[in-house]
Amino acid sequence: MTKVCMLVTNPCINDARVLKEAASLSKEGHELVIWGISDNGTPASENKNGFVIKRINRKKKRNTLLGKLAYSSQFIYHSIKENADVYHAHDLSTLLECYIASKWKGSKVVYDSHELYIRDFDNKKNYKNLYFYLEHLLINRVNLVITVNSLIARELQQRYKLKNLPSVIMNCPPLSNSDNGKVNAELKSKYDGKKVIVFQGVIREGLGLRNLIRSFAYLNDEYNLLVLGDGPILDELIDLTRQLSLDQKIYFTGKIPHEELLSYTKIAHLGVIYPEEYNLSHYYMAPNKFFEYIHANIPVLAPDYPFLKENISKYEIGLLTDNEDPEDFARCITEFFSDRKKYEKMRENTEVAKNSLNWESEEKKLSELYHNL
């Protein structure tokens, strides 16, 4: 039996990629432990789906130098004590710690790049330089590099002159979740007869959420926005909604357990990913919410970015727009529903898409990569 130690710089409560990978590898017979960060009363240790999650207590402020050094040293200490055969780094923020532990124990190391951590090279600050050189130094020394789509894989290979193209494991939900038919009855009743637009994910900067809310000032009461998730700008968005007198049209759920998320998403008629001035990471993105909308059988309105364009066009499951103006975005939403026959066809096509884009397919690739490792 192979022991795998994963590191991630969050509490690992709703991190879908980490939890799916851990469950799949555990199911394959690997002994698996995840080390994350304790946050807001999360338990120091818990068993979940055949693996263990352990959390360190971050006593220092996370964005201070002392805070970073403190949790980095704790990660290294606990990783070495795990005596793992494979150290699996989730993003660049844990790669150094996994690499040190792997060298100490003579183990393998996997670098799982969830996004382009170094997003651009314009007006680089010192910390960007530092992270660039750190990634450049370590990515050629690990045993396996995986990432979320082929665009980022090619960018990493070109950027760091990698001999092998990183392997791709996409962030698709499992079919077993989408086929259970469960829908949140209370919200379904609340929105009966309405056209429900959904945004889900971490409520943070860089996702166009302020303009998304403003766009509903240009839509009649037939259209409602459902915002699923929590994050650092949630309270600000709630205040903005009140200021614009949109309280009756926009509903914020706050944090939802990941296993319940799909039952909320299925209420909607359209899933949105808002276009915003992008860096390279945005441009190449393959966000979890895109796959989750598909598995909820709802069409998608998204930016005209390469990965999104390729899949929306391939499966004919939505529309593309790069217009950031709230009034124009509102017009795109109304256009979505203007042709009922076309809309229903897009909805039907999501069934075809999810039968290709699902975790059951991706976990087979992950299993083979670990077998070869």
Image (spheres, rainbow, N blue to C red):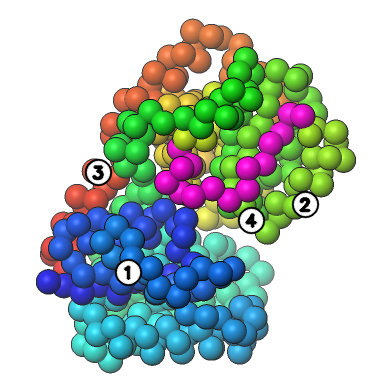
- Tell me the distance, in whole angstroms, between the alpha carbons under discs 3 and 1: 22 Å
Residue shown at 30% from the left, 37% from the top: 175
- The location of residue 146, given as percent across then percent down, is 32, 61
- The location of residue 316, given as percent across then percent down, is 42, 23
Mark on residue 360? 3
Q: Earlier in the sequence, mark 1 or mark 4?
A: 1
Q: Is residue 69 above or below residue 36?
A: below
Q: Label 4 belongs to which residue?
A: 231
Q: Is residue 300 above or below residue 360?
A: above
Q: Is residue 353 above or below residue 307?
A: above
Kindly state the secondary structure of the residue where label 1 is placed: strand
- Tell me the distance, in whole angstroms, between the alpha carbons under discs 3 and 4: 29 Å
Q: Label 1 belongs to which residue?
A: 52
Residue shown at 75% from the left, 20% from the top: 221
Kindly state the secondary structure of the residue where label 2 is placed: helix
Asked if one can make out residue 145 in the rendered structure from this viewpoint, the answer is: no
Amino acid under disc 2:
Glu
Kindly state the secondary structure of the residue where label 3 is placed: helix
Q: Label 2 belongs to which residue?
A: 236
- The location of residue 97, given as percent across then percent down, is 40, 83
> In which image quadrant can residue 176 be found?
top left
Q: Are marks 2 and 1 in contact (CB under 8 Å)?
A: no
Span highlighted in magenta in the image: 248-262
- The location of residue 189, given as percent across then percent down, is 59, 23
Q: Are marks 1 and 4 in contact (CB under 8 Å)?
A: no
Amino acid under disc 4:
Gly
Residue shown at 37% from the left, 85% from the top: 78
- Tell me the distance, in whole angstroms, between the alpha carbons under discs 3 and 2: 38 Å
